Image (cartoon, rainbow, N blue to C red):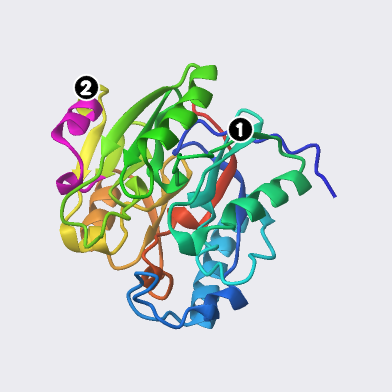
Amino acid sequence: MANWDLSPSVRTEVGSLESVLVHEPGPEFNTVVDPDEWEWNGLPRQEGAASEHEALIEELENRDVTIHRLDDAGDGLAESLFVRDVGFAIEGGLVVGKMVEETRHGEERRITERAVELGIPIYHSVHGAGGFEAGNMVWIDSETVAIGRSRTTNDEGIRQVQNVFETYDIDVVEVPIFGSTESTGQTHLALVFGMVASDLALVYPQAVPSEFLEILHDRGIEIIEVPMREQRNRVTSTIVVEPGEVLLPSGNPFVRDTLLDRAIDVVELDIREIRKTGGGLKGLILPLSRRTQP
């Protein structure tokens, strides 16, 4: 049944989170036999991953975030828990990407179907030669997004999405992703760059051009340089639940202490099983509504 009262609106990473779409790791998680084929770091336990995911949901619900669920992921779509990768909400509708990895083909259809059930219009679906995974898109401010260009997002995909952003007078900053990230080119921008406040960002500098760091500096954004070990621990893939409060993957003492020193509250969540799939906390939620700070 469509929820016609649901009106998506997201133009920030750091305003108060109001509603999200999620998918708990289900039976499809156990269809992976060869983790190397999926470029996973071992085989995560489905029960453990589901427990970690539920801990995240509890933290969100405790803060009055409305949870919408993608109940049926589809056969074999074992990475469906990372709903953020598949699309993004903006100004009343949803943009659906086009997954580049063959193992993820079909996730777009399920997100689209669920959006329709919720009464959310689909503004655009990336198609043709375009490749676009929304894990490569990070809001810098309400008028600017950064889009990472890597194996999972190509020039045509960026062009199509940029056309949507132009409708809303939103600028796009392209960020080629490279460097030592233990990746074959899959890395999403959210795994090397994340906003934790309107004037504070986590960055793994080895993976982005110096020109991008200069753009952030020119906008008055302070950079916390993330060490390699904590980048590999998915520390930049944080979730701001409200200004001044961040959900952080556990096991990242440098970033945790640095945020605390800047008077940002930190809630640590264990994602050791989920992390084996290569993703992070931010990928587990597709924000549908987030309040933009004045």
At horizontal 38% and vertical 51% (from top left) the residue drawn is 265
Q: Is residue 187 magenta?
A: no
Label of residue 9 in the image: 1
State the CA–CA distance, disc 1 to disc 2. 27 Å
Question: Counting other residues with Cα less than 10 Å from the Cα at mark 2, is it few (<14), some (14-19), or many (20 or more)?
Answer: few
Circles 1 and 2, Cβ within 8 Å, touching? The answer is no
- Image vertical order of residue 160 relative to residue 57, above or below: above
Examine the image and state in which quarter residue 47 appears: bottom right
- Image vertical order of residue 262 relative to residue 227, above or below: above
Q: Can residue 64 be seen at all in this image of the molecule?
A: no
- Image vertical order of residue 145 relative to residue 203, above or below: above
| Residue labelled with disc 2 | 218
Q: Label 1's element?
A: loop
Examine the image and state in which quarter residue 250 appears: bottom left
Q: Label 2's element?
A: helix
Q: Earlier in the sequence, mark 1 or mark 2?
A: 1
Which stretch appears magenta?
Answer: 203-216
State the predominant SS element of the stretch in magenta: helix
Label of residue 157 in the image: none
Viewer-proximal residue among 9 and 130:
130
Residue 282 x, y percent position in the rendering: 44, 53
